[in-house]
Image (spheres, grey):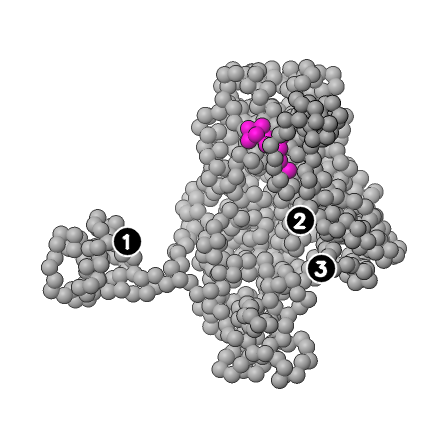
């Protein structure tokens, strides 16, 4: 079907009296069958209104009717909606994702039709144009200005006319009443600026030019996956911009996925510098009106480049020519609720269906991606050096067992001395600690009582600046108690461990004259605040940035020469099999913020385990050695990417029913050679948002069909109605 909704050759057309399947964006088992009434014809992918019980629902024509219900019992569709149709490849993609994740296709379709208002006709607005013959009326200077202005411009709203002519809207209304201006009705949909691929790009080095050429050559040549692997500061973004330019020149749309789109202030500025206009944006911070306009602009092809979070993968692009997944290793691409999927992996699938290239970008690619490169499933383009020739920052470790700080402090003397030297040189420093708030735990020193969330199996985190204890899982918050809730002793509640706010307190004591900024997801909540954060640091209005994970997200601050990691071992505890990989990636990314300008950088890691493979690899700056060691460990344990995992999460408000369902799943677990089932066991977060949780984990070799095993397992298990069982194919976290 074409952009304007007309049928084209190759569409599956359903004439009157045809039996069709319509998929509704609901978690239902499959499509429902309907008939096409007299006077209508529809095509596969058309968005239609259908009767559902006593109400009207919206669905998508999915194909031929699947059932054998008598014609007389089938209900007619009501008619097509004023919305662009979904193309065949997107329909096939939805079906594939549903089969892979074991979620209903309707639940996946709901991620495509995520803005119901976008399926309604766009609002109409009244514009005004000048009449061909202006009647004989009394002309004032204001009226003359309006008529002269409107003779050389397009129709526009009354308020815009009044503003441009420098008068009130009453003057415009008078001209309308007199017949000098004529009203016309038009759609309220906004215009979308088109990025210009012919603008001069950034001056690339020889390595960057070679990489850009390699990526650009794949655009327009069908499906291919390429890893763009480069050290921090090597200019990966500017390189893949050239592939975007190639796709735009070929008349194609482009999707770029970022792990946290709201924090990409510098990325957006680089894009606008390169292409002359900002891209369309898709993320959770958008208003509903903006989401509606963006969805329709994507579906109609007006939005040529979209930058979005993981959900943008399900937007209805009719002319998709390139997908880029930046920071492809980031765990934010895994959706942990609703339909559980990994956007990076599903991007590979969508690229295959669309027959377009995919670029995976990272300085610390995931082990899954590295192994696919080594097995020649993916291509690779490498940028081994920083743009401009700067060396990577030198990394040094402080053994906190021997050279730690005094009791009650968190910064070692060596790190404090390095900060002093940095400030004396007029440079900026960063302290990284992946703990928000003031302290991760508050306990009573009299009886040992710990402040825990009443709805989750999590300690309450003290946020001293806000004056509250808060759960970072469900949002529960309360004031710090004046006495212990258990023993009622007063003045006995004390904070344990450091958070970024507590570091800021220590820094204020050690360096009272420096300007400090705390950057976490609590203080940087959206694009505007992220842009202001970048401006403040770039303009050197602060000397020290104290941050959690968000400061590791690819920022480029030329005056930042020193990074101190307060607790480099933090991510290594907990026993998760990806703990070493995630910690190495995070430390490597944080270290990459130092020394990106003209001055050399240095990184100091405070560690209680300096002999750990992750810490040793960071000191040696030997990423490949770490990958080789991690690959061998995963191979020996038959863990991804050398094995397959699938999880079942059993949850409900009634703990006894949850245990009953989990036990039933344990009894019906598959007994197959090469398939191992662990559990049931309480989840790491055994209580989350008031729901009790149990987990079971299936592990097998890559040759086994995990989906068929899981489907049969769930089918045989007795599940009470008030218990929910979620399937997580290829789990990333195990909370």
Mark 1 touches mark 3? (CB < 8 Å): no
Say if 402 sits above or below 34 in the image.
Answer: above
Residue 341 x, y percent position in the rendering = 66, 53
User: Could you tell me which residue is drawn at 68 percent across and 66 percent down?
Assistant: 29
* Residue 199: x %, y % from top left: 41, 46
User: Up-down: is 675 above or below 95?
Assistant: above
Query: SS for tag 3?
Result: loop
Q: Which residue is mark 2?
A: 336
Count up the numbered dots.
Answer: 3
The answer to whether residue 469 is magenta is yes
* Mark 2 nearby-residue class (10 Å; few <14, some 14–19, many ≥20): some
Q: Earlier in the sequence, mark 3 or mark 2?
A: 3
Circle 1 residue: 159
Q: Residues within 10 Å of mark 3 (few under 14, many from 20)?
A: some
In-front residue for pair 528/279: 528
Span highlighted in magenta in the image: 462-472
Asked if residue 669 is among those painted magenta in the image, a careful observer would answer: no
In the rendered image, is residue 49 in sight? yes
User: Label 1, label 3: how many angstroms apart (C-alpha)?
Assistant: 52 Å
Per the image, label 1 sits on a secondary structure element best described as helix
Residue 258 appears left or right of 492: left
Give me the C-alpha separation between circle 1 and circle 2.
46 Å
Q: Are marks 3 and 2 in contact (CB under 8 Å)?
A: no
Give the CA distance from mark 3 to mark 2: 14 Å
- Check the image and report above or below for 261 versus 133: above
């Amino acid at each position: 079907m074409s952009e304007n909704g007309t049928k084209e050759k190759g569409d599956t057309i359903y004439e009157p009296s045809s039996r069709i399947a319509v998929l509704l964006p609901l978690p239902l088992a499959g499509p429902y069958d309907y008939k096409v009434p007299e006077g209508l014809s529809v095509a596969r992918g058309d968005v239609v209104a259908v009767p559902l019980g006593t109400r009207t629902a919206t669905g998508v024509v999915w194909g031929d009717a699947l059932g054998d219900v008598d014609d007389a019992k089938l209900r007619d569709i009501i008619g097509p909606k004023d919305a662009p149709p979904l193309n065949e490849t997107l329909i096939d993609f939805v079906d594939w994702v549903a089969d892979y994740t074991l979620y209903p296709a309707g639940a996946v379709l709901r991620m495509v039709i995520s803005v119901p208002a976008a399926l309604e006709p766009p609002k109409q607005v009244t514009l005004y144009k000048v009449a061909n013959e202006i009647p004989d009326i009394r002309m004032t200077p204001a009226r003359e200005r309006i008529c002269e202005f409107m003779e050389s411009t397009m129709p526009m709203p009354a308020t815009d006319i009044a503003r441009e002519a420098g008068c009130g809207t009453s003057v415009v209304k008078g001209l309308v009443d007199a017949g000098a201006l004529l009203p016309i009705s038009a759609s309220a949909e906004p215009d979308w600026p088109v990025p210009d691929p012919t603008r001069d790009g950034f001056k690339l080095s020889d390595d960057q030019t070679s990489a850009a050429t390699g990526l650009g050559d794949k655009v327009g040549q069908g499906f291919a996956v390429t890893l763009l692997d480069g050290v921090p500061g090597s200019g990966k973004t500017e390189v893949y911009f050239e592939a975007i330019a190639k796709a735009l020149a070929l008349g194609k749309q482009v999707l770029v996925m970022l792990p946290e789109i709201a924090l990409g202030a510098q990325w957006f500025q680089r894009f606008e510098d390169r292409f002359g206009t900002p891209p369309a944006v898709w993320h959770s911070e958008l208003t509903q009106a903006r989401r509606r306009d963006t969805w329709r602009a994507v579906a109609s092809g007006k939005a040529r480049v979209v930058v979005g979070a993981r959900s943008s993968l399900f937007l209805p692009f009719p002319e998709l020519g390139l997908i880029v997944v930046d920071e492809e290793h980031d765990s934010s691409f895994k959706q942990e609720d609703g339909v559980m999927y990994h956007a990076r992996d599903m991007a590979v699938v969508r690229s295959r269906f669309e027959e377009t290239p995919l670029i995976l970008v990272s300085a610390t690619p995931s082990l899954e991606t590295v192994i696919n490169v080594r097995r020649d499933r993916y291509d690779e383009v490498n940028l081994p050096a920083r743009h401009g020739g700067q060396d990577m920052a030198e990394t040094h470790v402080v053994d906190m067992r021997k050279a730690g700080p005094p009791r009650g402090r968190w910064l070692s003397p060596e790190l404090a001395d390095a900060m002093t030297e940095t400030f004396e040189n007029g440079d900026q420093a960063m302290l990284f600690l992946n703990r928000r708030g003031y302290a991760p735990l508050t306990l009573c020193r009299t009886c040992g009582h710990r402040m825990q969330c009443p709805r989750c199996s999590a300690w309450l985190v003290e946020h001293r600046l806000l004056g509250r204890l808060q759960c970072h899982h469900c949002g529960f918050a309360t004031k710090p108690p004046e006495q212990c809730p258990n023993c009622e002793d007063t003045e006995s509640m004390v904070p344990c461990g450091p958070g970024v706010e507590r570091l800021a307190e220590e820094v204020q004591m050690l360096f009272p004259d420096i300007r400090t900024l705390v950057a976490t997801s609590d203080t940087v909540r959206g694009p505007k605040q992220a842009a202001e954060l970048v401006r403040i640091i770039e303009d050197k209005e602060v000397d020290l940035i104290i941050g959690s994970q968000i400061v590791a997200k690819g920022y480029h601050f030329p005056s930042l020469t020193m990074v101190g990691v307060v607790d480099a071992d933090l991510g290594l505890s907990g026993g998760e099999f990806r703990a070493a990989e995630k910690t190495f990636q995070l430390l490597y990314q944080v270290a990459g913020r130092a020394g990106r300008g003209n001055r050399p950088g240095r990184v100091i890691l405070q560690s209680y385990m300096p002999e750990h493979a992750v810490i040793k690899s960071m000191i040696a700056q030997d990423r490949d050695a770490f990958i080789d060691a991690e690959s061998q460990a995963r191979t020996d344990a038959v863990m991804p990417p050398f094995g397959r995992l699938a999880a079942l999460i059993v949850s409900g408000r009634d703990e006894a029913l949850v245990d009953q369902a989990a036990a039933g799943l344990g009894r019906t677990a598959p007994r197959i050679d090469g398939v191992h089932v662990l559990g049931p066991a309480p989840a790491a977060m055994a209580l989350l948002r008031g729901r009790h949780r149990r987990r079971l984990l299936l592990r097998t070799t890559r040759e086994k069909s995990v989906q068929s095993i899981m489907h049969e397992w769930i089918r045989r298990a007795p599940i009470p109605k008030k218990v929910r069982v979620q399937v997580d194919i290829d789990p990333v976290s195990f909370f």
